[in-house]
Image (spheres, rainbow, N blue to C red):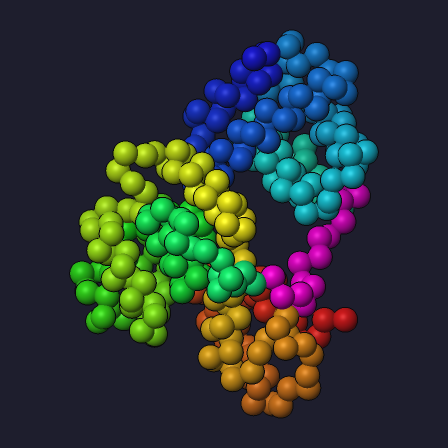
């Protein structure tokens, strides 16, 4: 480990912002930045984090562009650089993405990215992972939320068949944003009963495993049956909720149609509801899951 990476390590140890997954990704990114600066000719074995300047950021961006990295990936990497710049007291050093020639990513495509499990053999999954998948499917949970899920806490003292909402704990959620998700179907309540029976007052991470260890098992098992990252289950939940709330398929499923005034009102209301249930604070994000009626 050279001097620059050692310095990054100390910054990471002092600043544990965000979820475990966010911290893990940030550590991997900073390590990669050191290697890329080294390849660009910089003597990282003689550098401290405070030595990072605008020319180093420009060198990284040139490296990414040569490698053909997508705009979305570059924006994710820039968010880690901004985090680092803040920690070393150089926030003003980082310019806007547009200044660096990083294009806006295309969030809305009107393509159906939902993941259906009907043709997958979920019985091959171990019980804890299988139950997390069921919760992702029925409540639109993120993977980390579904793994850390503690049914006893989430039910707030109710049994699964009388609880009005599901409580998502801040430490499970992206950005530490707690939220409540309404419980409205028998399928949801059955999934909650199964989770409660399995985990009791614990989480859906087996007691003998750490979060990191269980994540490795989760990724291997879901990949083996074709589930991949499981994010498509959030798309499936959002699309199903939209159909229940509006009475028609969203654009990413049913394509573009001319909406009546009543449907336009229902569309806006549904998107506001679904955005909250998914744990987003921007209404525009629902376009990723549902598509847009004005997409060209």
> Quick one: 243 or 97, which is closer to the camera?
243
Residue 75 image-quadrant placement = top right
Residue 187's x, y, as percent? 34, 70
Whether residue 178 is visible, yes or no, is no
Q: Is residue 78 visible?
A: yes
Left or right, 197 with respect to 68, comes to left
- 77 or 189: which is nearer to us? 189
For the view shown, which residue lies furthest in the top direction?
46
Q: At 25% from the left edge and 62% from the top edge, which residue is drawn? A: 193
Report the span colored magenta. Answer: 100-113
Identify which residue is drawn at 74% across, 19% down: 39
Whether the magenta-drawn stretch holds residue 107 is answered as yes
In the image, residue 5 sits, relative to residue 270, either above or below, namely: above
* Vertical position of residue 124 compared to residue 59: above or below: below
What quarter of the picture does the N terminus occupy? Answer: top right
User: In the picture shown, does residue 197 fall above or below 249?
Assistant: above
């Amino acid at each position: 480990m050279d001097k620059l990476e050692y310095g990054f390590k100390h910054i990471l140890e002092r600043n544990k912002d965000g979820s475990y997954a966010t911290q893990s990704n940030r550590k991997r990114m900073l390590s990669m930045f050191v290697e890329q600066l080294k390849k660009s000719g910089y003597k990282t074995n003689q550098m401290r984090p405070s030595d990072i300047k605008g020319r180093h950021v420009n060198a990284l961006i040139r490296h990414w562009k040569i490698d053909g990295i997508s705009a979305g990936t570059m924006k994710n990497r820039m968010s880690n650089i901004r985090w680092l710049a803040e920690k070393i007291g150089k926030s003003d050093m980082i310019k806007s993405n547009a200044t660096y020639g990083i294009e806006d990513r295309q969030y809305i495509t009107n393509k159906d990215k939902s993941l259906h499990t009907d043709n997958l053999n979920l019985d091959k999954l171990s019980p804890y992972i299988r139950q997390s998948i069921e919760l992702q499917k029925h409540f639109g949970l993120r993977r980390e939320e579904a793994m850390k899920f503690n049914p006893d806490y989430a039910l707030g003292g109710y049994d699964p068949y009388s609880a009005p909402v599901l409580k998502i704990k801040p430490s499970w959620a992206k950005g530490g944003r707690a939220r409540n998700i309404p419980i409205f179907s028998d399928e949801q309540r059955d999934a909650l009963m199964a989770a409660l029976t399995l985990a009791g007052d614990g989480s859906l991470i087996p007691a003998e495993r750490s979060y990191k260890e269980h994540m490795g098992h989760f990724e291997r098992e879901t990949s083996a049956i074709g589930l991949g990252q499981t994010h498509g289950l959030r798309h499936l939940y959002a699309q199903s909720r939209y159909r229940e709330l509006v009475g028609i398929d969203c654009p990413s499923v049913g394509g573009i149609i001319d909406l009546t005034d009543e449907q336009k009102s229902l569309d806006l209301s549904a998107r506001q509801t679904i955005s909250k249930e998914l744990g987003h604070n921007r209404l525009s994000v629902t376009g990723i899951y549902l598509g847009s009626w004005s997409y060209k």
